[in-house]
Image (cartoon, grey):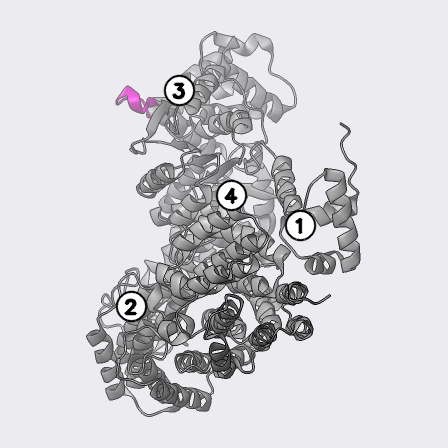
């Protein structure tokens, strides 16, 4: 059968179908009309012999996957030929095929990395989901192993999860090979990470390189031997020397010298790095010079256990190569050891360019060091970069310490990092599109340098002002890069540095004797800087949905504010902690005791100075704690809904007076919840809408971003509750496109799925459901008040389409994504009864939704009340219930103002009166309300009742 010819434009449309975009979104992306998109879609269905759009989306994903390179997309491309190692390659390939975790172990310079890369490239065809290379040499600590892997995989943080959990979730059903290089320096982090990864990801294999075993249960160790010297002049070791010497001199050494070269390689114990460094000197020294120079160095290092000889041979060649350098080049080699990532000549000038080196000497010296194989020149899109193998970099660092230049060079490296961080921050601010701009690649190329400089500066009291500045800068960049866990960590670190203590953010002790806070923070710092950083860290924790951390950090900020002599600030922080315990109670692993939260509120009252900001924070905490305005069911059961509304309205007024849009949005959230509990859904929707409008012009910060995401979700949900489907879909789309929800497609699309389902947008629901499901599974299948309704909405659409198998699968998701009671009494009753009514099973529908709304008020009062009342009435009418007319009359007052629910009651009234013309007339009302499915249903019901 001939392969169908797909035009380039059709290919573009197919790719976007694979991203589950609607026709309108595809048209906007490609700058064509919706009609043209429809034409291309029809053509694709015909050419690919597929039944529907859903099948096209699946095919697009399959094609994209098939076109993905099967060789390692992230493997570094070595600049020199891999020589020899045939036996080792074959043995390691077999070991990797038989075992899930293999560690290539050997001393530095033996050739572990090159061997691992060669084996990984050869094995790539067996891993459908790719081979991924992670260099752990630049990683600053064991706690950053998962972050390094996540960065290479492109995995973002999931709410309530660490990055190690996110990586495991992303790889749980993938067949992939992970190559972890240079594990020895972070073994304490690699071992537990691999235990979790291999337990959670049965199709993942790991090839690690390390100078020592990792000591994990799955590990099989492969000792990497030196290059073979068997065969003398024909050995692998000599072959490597000849290849590198030829590259350095431009002409191959005389074959007659092979035996002499073999002797040199034997003296070097076959260590690959030592051989390469010696070969780089061939053009200037020749065989006699090499033998003489190496003999002296090796004699100096002779003695001791034979087990150390291989390491000594590398050290000897490094010492010898170092001594052969001109003094200026020695200085350059040791100074550039401050860099942990590939660096440009300009960066080298900034860090290493002081006497005896000027800018020209640095540039020339880099070239000479590269010629001697002490540096590697790597072409990049932004010019040539230089890097040293880790063994050479560590040697350079030793020389830097020995020369007494470490503090000066690392200080210049810190200054260069500060300047780079400032430049990246300006670029991010100018672009205003943190997920789409060009500054991210710059951040990725600099991030480990920033972390290294920060770790160094944080341990030196005289540089702590700069360390704090860098911690704050790194926090902001990490937040914009969606590295929320690191953003929080750096803010906590900044708080510690502001206070002058040397720890990691958990202690306020340790300020140098006799030093004031101003002397251990930077010159323009204020006494409340620690509290400010902790407040910002709490806001980032909110973006991460970590209620326990929000609560802890607000309390820590209060303590820091009191230490700084700011009782009013402490009052605001304690009030915020109390509010968090109620407003975000579902994000806590362990909720604080009610008495503890009440005590925080009481202490906040004592400390308050009556300022607008403190009064607003207290009013919001009182609405949350005393009136349970957020519906966390922790407040007094004697509190009436009307009293709750009063508390919330007072909080809104005080926040507005304080001029704080984030605080006002939080208070409006309380007011929206209070109106819902009071049975006032239009007022609830209005308050939610005001939040979106209030926050729209706000600059993106952790506080505004967290509030915006919550506001969009609540605005979409409450708009659904009153039948405003078009605005609900608009806010749902904004939520799905918000940068903060980029890694959490299940949370991002939840309310959009519900709105699309009620609107009858079947194709959009099915496409969005695929994204939801993938993200939900990748996120560890969490449970949330919005996830259950989303899955139930997709299940309803499948039910309306007659696909019972798909509906059953989605109902199983509902059982894990939501709670059983909410599904049984609330949204589930609405969705299930709608499917049963569609199938003509009115009696079964009525049975599913039989309780009166007031009997299930807890589960319907927020979003579902109008839908519940209208569907229940329709089921009563169609099943001939004797109280149908009475129920219809009672529901009128409940749903008044909701265009969809009113139209449904009008249709039920017409059916009850036996008036097909009036039934048909409701189709227009439904269409005007953006409810396509119900409009079509009116026409069907009119026909069944005797209409045209």
322 on left or right of 37: left
In this orientation, does residue 813 appear? yes
Which badge, 4 or 1, is on the more N-terminal residue?
Answer: 1
Q: State which quarter of the image contains the N terminus.
A: top right
Q: Does 288 appear in magenta?
A: no
The part of the image, by quadrant, that contains residue 849 is bottom left
**CB contact under 8 Å: marks 4 and 3:** no
Query: Whole-percent x and y of residue 513?
Result: 22, 69
For marks 3 and 2, the one nearer the N-term is 3
Indicate whether 502 appears above or below 198. below
Confirm or deny contact between disc 4 and disc 2 (CB under 8 A).
Answer: no
Task: Kindly identify which residue carries mark 2.
Answer: 552
- Tell me if residue 308 is in the magenta stretch: yes
Range of magenta residues: 301-309
- Ranked by sequence position, the earlier of labels 4 and 3 is 3
What's the residue at 26%, 78% (across, down)?
563
Report x, y in % for residue 273: 46, 27
Tell me the crowding category of disc 1: few under 14, some 14 to 19, or many 20 or more residues within 10 angstroms, Cα based: many
Measured along the vertical axis of the image, is residue 402 above or below residue 703? Answer: above
Q: x, y (%) of residue 435?
A: 57, 59
Residue at 48%, 38% (x, y): give it: 174
């Amino acid at each position: 059968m001939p392969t169908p010819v797909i035009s380039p434009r059709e290919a573009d449309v197919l790719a976007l179908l694979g991203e589950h975009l609607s026709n309108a979104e595809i048209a906007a992306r490609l700058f064509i009309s919706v009609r043209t998109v429809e034409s291309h879609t029809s053509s694709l269905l015909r050419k690919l012999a597929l039944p529907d759009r859903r099948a096209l989306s699946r095919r697009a994903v399959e094609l994209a996957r098939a076109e993905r390179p099967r060789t390692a997309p992230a493997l570094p491309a070595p600049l020199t030929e891999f020589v020899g190692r045939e036996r080792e390659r074959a043995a390691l390939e077999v070991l990797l095929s038989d075992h899930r975790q293999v560690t290539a172990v050997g001393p530095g310079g033996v050739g572990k990395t090159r061997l691992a890369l060669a084996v990984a490239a050869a094995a790539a065809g067996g891993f459908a989901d790719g081979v991924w290379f992670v260099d752990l040499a630049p990683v600053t600590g064991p706690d950053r192993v998962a972050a390094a892997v996540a960065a290479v995989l492109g995995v973002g943080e999931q709410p309530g999860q660490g990055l190690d959990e996110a990586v495991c979730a992303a790889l749980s059903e993938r067949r992939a090979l992970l190559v972890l290089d240079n594990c020895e320096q972070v073994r304490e982090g690699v071992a537990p990470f691999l235990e979790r990864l291999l337990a959670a990801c049965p199709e993942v294999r790991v090839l690690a390189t390390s100078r020592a075993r990792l000591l994990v249960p799955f590990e099989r160790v492969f000792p990497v031997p030196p290059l073979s010297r068997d065969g003398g002049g024909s050995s692998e070791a000599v072959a490597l020397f000849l290849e590198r010497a030829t590259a350095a001199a431009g002409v191959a050494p005389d074959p007659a010298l092979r035996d002499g070269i073999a002797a040199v390689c034997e003296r070097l114990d076959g260590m690959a790095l030592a051989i390469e460094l010696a070969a780089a000197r061939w053009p200037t020294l020749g065989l006699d010079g090499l033998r003489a120079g190496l003999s002296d160095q090796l004699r100096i290092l002779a003695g001791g256990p034979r087990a150390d000889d291989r390491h000594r041979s590398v050290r000897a060649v490094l010492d010898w190569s170092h001594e052969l350098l001109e003094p200026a080049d020695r200085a350059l080699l040791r100074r550039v050891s401050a860099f942990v990532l590939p660096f440009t000549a300009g960066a080298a000038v900034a860090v290493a360019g002081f006497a005896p080196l000027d800018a020209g000497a640095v540039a020339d010296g880099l070239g000479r060091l590269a010629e001697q194989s002490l540096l590697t020149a790597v072409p990049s899109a932004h010019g040539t970069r230089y890097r040293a193998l880790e063994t050479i970099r560590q040697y350079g660092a030793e020389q830097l310490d020995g020369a007494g230049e470490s503090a000066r060079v690392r200080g210049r490296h810190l200054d260069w990092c500060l300047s780079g961080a400032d430049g990246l921050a300006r670029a991010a601010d100018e672009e205003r599109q943190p997920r789409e701009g060009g500054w991210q690649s710059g951040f990725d190329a600099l991030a480990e340098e920033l972390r290294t400089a920060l770790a160094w500066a944080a341990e030196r009291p005289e540089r702590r002002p700069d360390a704090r500045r860098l911690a704050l800068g790194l926090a902001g960049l990490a937040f914009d890069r969606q590295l929320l866990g690191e953003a929080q960590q750096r803010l906590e670190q900044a708080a510690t540095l502001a206070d002058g203590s040397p720890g990691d953010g958990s202690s306020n002790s340790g300020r140098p004797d006799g030093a004031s806070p101003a002397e251990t923070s930077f010159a323009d710092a204020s006494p409340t800087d620690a509290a400010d950083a902790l407040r910002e860290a709490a806001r980032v924790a909110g973006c991460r949905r970590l209620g326990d951390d929000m609560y802890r950090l607000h309390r820590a900020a209060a303590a820091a504010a009191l230490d700084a002599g700011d009782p009013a600030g402490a009052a605001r922080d304690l009030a915020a902690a109390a509010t968090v315990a109620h407003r975000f109670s579902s994000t806590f692993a362990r909720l604080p005791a009610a008495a503890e939260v009440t005590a925080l509120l009481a202490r906040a009252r004592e400390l308050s100075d009556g300022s607008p900001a403190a009064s607003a924070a207290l009013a919001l905490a009182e609405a949350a704690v005393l009136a349970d305005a957020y519906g966390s069911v922790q407040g007094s059961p004697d509190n009436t809904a009307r009293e709750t509304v009063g508390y919330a309205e007072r909080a809104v007024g005080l926040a507005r007076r304080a001029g704080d849009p984030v605080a006002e949005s939080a208070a409006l959230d309380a007011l929206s919840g209070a109106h819902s509990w009071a049975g006032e859904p239009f007022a609830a929707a209005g308050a939610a809408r005001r939040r979106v409008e209030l926050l729209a012009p706000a600059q993106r910060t952790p506080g505004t971003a967290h509030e915006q995401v919550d506001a969009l979700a609540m605005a979409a949900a409450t708009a659904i509750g009153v039948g405003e489907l078009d605005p609900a879909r608009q806010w749902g789309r904004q939520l799905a496109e918000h940068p903060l929800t980029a890694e959490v497609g299940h949370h991002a699309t939840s309310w959009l799925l519900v709105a699309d389902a009620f609107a009858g947008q079947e194709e959009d629901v099915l496409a969005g459901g695929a994204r939801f499901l993938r993200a939900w599974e990748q996120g560890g299948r969490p449970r949330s008040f919005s996830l259950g309704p989303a899955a139930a909405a997709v299940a309803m659409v499948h039910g309306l389409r007659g696909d019972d198998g798909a509906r059953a699968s989605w109902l199983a998701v509902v059982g894990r994504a939501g709670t059983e009671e909410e599904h049984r009494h609330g949204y589930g009753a609405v969705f299930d009864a709608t499917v049963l009514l569609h199938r003509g099973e009115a009696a079964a529908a009525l049975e599913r939704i039989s309780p009166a709304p007031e009997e299930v008020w807890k589960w319907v009062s927020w979003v579902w009340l109008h839908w519940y009342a209208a569907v229940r009435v329709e089921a009563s009418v169609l099943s001939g219930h004797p109280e149908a007319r009475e129920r219809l009359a009672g529901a009128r007052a409940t749903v008044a103002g909701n265009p969809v629910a009113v139209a449904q009651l009008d249709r039920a009234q017409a059916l009850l009166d036996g008036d097909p013309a009036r039934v048909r007339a409701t189709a227009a009302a439904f269409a005007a309300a953006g409810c396509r499915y119900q409009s079509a249903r009116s026409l069907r019901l009119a026909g069944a009742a005797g209409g045209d």
